[in-house]
Image (cartoon, helix red, strand yellow):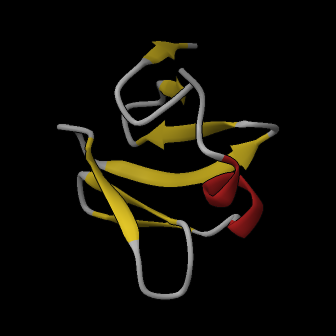
């Protein structure tokens, strides 16, 4: 699967401790529980890059599937 275009096009992500909120509009978002402290997150093309405080980077293809870079 891939991210729905409404999430990628809106382009807003917010970090809260060990969670990342991915917005599709001003009022609605998906909350992804990372399980480790998050430094920051940003869109890279159609995928979400999540930078962890331990130096690892997770690349999310959708809200459930990621690979560690």
| Residue at point 34%, 27% (across, down) | 64
Q: Residue furthest right?
A: 45
Q: Left or right: 3 with respect to 5?
A: left
Q: Nearer the viewer, residue 53 or 65?
A: 65
| Residue at point 40%, 76% (across, down) | 28
* Residue 36 position in % (x across, y down): 22, 38
* Residue 24 position in % (x across, y down): 55, 67
Q: Nearer the viewer, residue 58 or 30?
A: 30
* Placement of 27 over or under 38, stated as above or below: below
| Residue at point 60%, 37% (across, down) | 49
* Placement of 20 over or under 14, stated as above or below: above
Q: Residue furthest left?
A: 35
* Placement of 14 over or under 45, stated as above or below: below
| Residue at point 74%, 37% (across, down) | 46
Q: How many marks?
A: 0
* Residue 23 position in % (x across, y down): 50, 68
Q: Quadrant of residue 21?
A: bottom left
Q: Left or right: 44 with respect to 25?
A: right
Q: Quadrant of the image for the C terminus?
A: top right
* Residue 4 position in % (x across, y down): 61, 44
Q: Nearer the viewer, residue 64 or 36?
A: 64
């Amino acid at each position: 699967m891939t991210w729905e275009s409404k999430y990628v096009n809106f382009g807003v992500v917010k970090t809260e401790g060990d969670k990342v909120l991915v917005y599709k509009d001003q009022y609605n978002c998906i909350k992804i529980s990372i399980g480790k402290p998050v430094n920051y997150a940003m869109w890279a093309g159609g995928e979400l890059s999540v930078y962890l405080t331990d130096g690892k980077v997770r690349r999310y293809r959708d809200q459930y599937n990621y690979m560690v870079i």
